Image (spheres, grey):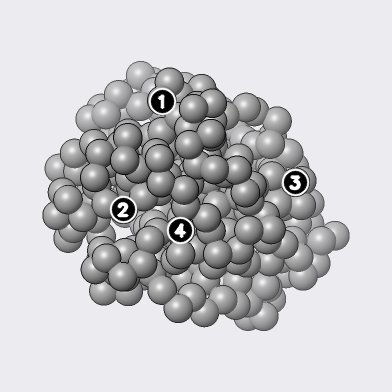
């Protein structure tokens, strides 16, 4: 299927309330695409999935149309975190049984989620044609959203790098633990050296105080400034908050469960920053995912 074929096909999502019912072709003509933000860290367990879920929920409350791509393909658990049980996933798309838009589920507040794929560990296990199928289908309805958040897996696999290099912004998550700081640095290093990524945003998670979070930024910025050709922007912090764990156990975003909790207020401040920066203009109104080779 060519890009032109794809653009003339009118695809509608299952749940239409949170998305526009305008035909696809119109959005593409206008060149509208969402801001694509990858949330990544290098080290696992630093809070990426919680950040994605809570930013998504808060951005929805601000009236933004948000799509979350659970790109932790083999082990994704965003659906579990939000108490959802998706019926379909990417594997149904690959087998040609479903269109990607039919796989999307609706979360709290009208948040749209593309669940991880059971049976597909990462994109490298797909053929070029299969990858093209997934991302050209994504391009068909992406214009209906204002923001797409990508929850990447831990590590610096080619799968994780692929999602990062295809995003408009990379949000690095680090905690005050030295292992998290070194892994965040390693992630920025590989993206800058191999793919010339030169700008990163940092969110410090699970800090005991604002001061401790500031210190993490200072440390990372110092080494990045000295050894890498990049700029780092401090985007904010999420403090250590027991309410986050409580939310995880209840399978609810803390911003929904306890909107006045410290962490929830941190998420609101962060979401406000994201909402206030416009999406980049793309000439064709589409991304270039399907054409990008897998990083090696
Ligand atoms: N600010 C915080 N305060 C307290 N607990 C937190 C905070 N952020 C995350 N957690 C806890 O840390 C755990 C890991 O969070 P999460 O699953 O979001 O990390 P992750 O980076 O997505 O992990 P993985 O790399 O395995 O995908 C969760 O159980 C969550 O409750
Ligand atoms: Mg995760």
Q: CA distance from mark 4 to mark 1?
A: 20 Å
- Residue depth check, mark 3 versus mark 1: number of the one nearer the observer: 1
Identify the disc placed on residue 63.
3
Q: Earlier in the sequence, mark 1 or mark 2?
A: 2
* Image point (60%, 43%), residue name: 22
Q: Are marks 1 and 2 in contact (CB under 8 Å)?
A: no
- Which residue is disc 4 drawn over? 101
Badge 1 density bin: few <14, some 14–19, many ≥20, Cα 10 Å: few
Q: Quadrant of residue 282?
A: top left
Pointer 4 with pointer 1, Cβ within 8 A: no
Disc 3, ligand 1: is the CB inside 8 Å?
no
Q: Which residue is mark 1?
A: 284
In the structure shown, which secondary structural element does the residue marked by tag 1 occupy?
A: loop
- The location of residue 75, given as percent across then percent down, is 36, 70
Q: Mark 4 vs mark 1: which is more N-terminal?
A: 4
CA separation in Å, label 1 and label 2: 18 Å
Locate residue 230 relative to residue 18 in the image: left or right. Answer: left
């Amino acid at each position: 299927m060519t890009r032109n074929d794809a653009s003339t096909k009118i695809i509608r999502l299952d749940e239409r309330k949170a998305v526009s019912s305008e035909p696809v072709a119109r959005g593409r003509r206008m060149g509208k695409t969402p801001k694509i933000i990858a949330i990544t860290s290098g080290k696992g367990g630093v809070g990426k999935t919680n950040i994605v879920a809570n930013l998504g929920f808060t951005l929805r409350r601000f009236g933004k149309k948000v799509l979350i791509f659970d790109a932790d393909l083999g082990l994704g658990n965003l659906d579990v975190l939000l108490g959802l049980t998706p019926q379909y996933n990417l594997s149904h798309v690959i087998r040609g049984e479903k269109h990607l838009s039919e796989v999307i589920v609706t979360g709290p507040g009208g948040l749209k989620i593309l669940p991880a794929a059971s049976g597909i560990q990462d994109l490298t296990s797909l053929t070029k044609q299969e990858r093209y199928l997934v991302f050209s289908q994504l391009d068909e309805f992406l214009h209906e959203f204002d923001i797409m958040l990508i929850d990447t897996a831990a590590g610096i696999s080619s799968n994780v790098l692929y999602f990062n290099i295809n995003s408009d912004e990379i949000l690095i998550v680090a905690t005050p633990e030295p292992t998290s700081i070194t892994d965040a640095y390693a992630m920025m290093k590989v993206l800058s050296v191999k793919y010339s990524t030169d700008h990163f945003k940092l969110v410090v998670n699970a800090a005991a105080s604002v001061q401790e979070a500031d210190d993490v930024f200072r440390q990372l910025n110092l080494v990045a400034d000295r050894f890498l050709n990049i700029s780092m922007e401090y985007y904010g912090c999420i403090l250590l908050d027991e309410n986050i764990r409580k939310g995880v156990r209840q399978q609810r975003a803390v911003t929904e469960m306890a909107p006045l909790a410290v962490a929830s207020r941190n998420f609101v401040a962060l979401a406000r920053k994201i909402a206030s920066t416009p999406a980049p203009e793309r000439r064709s109104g589409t991304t270039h995912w399907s054409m990008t080779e897998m990083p090696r």
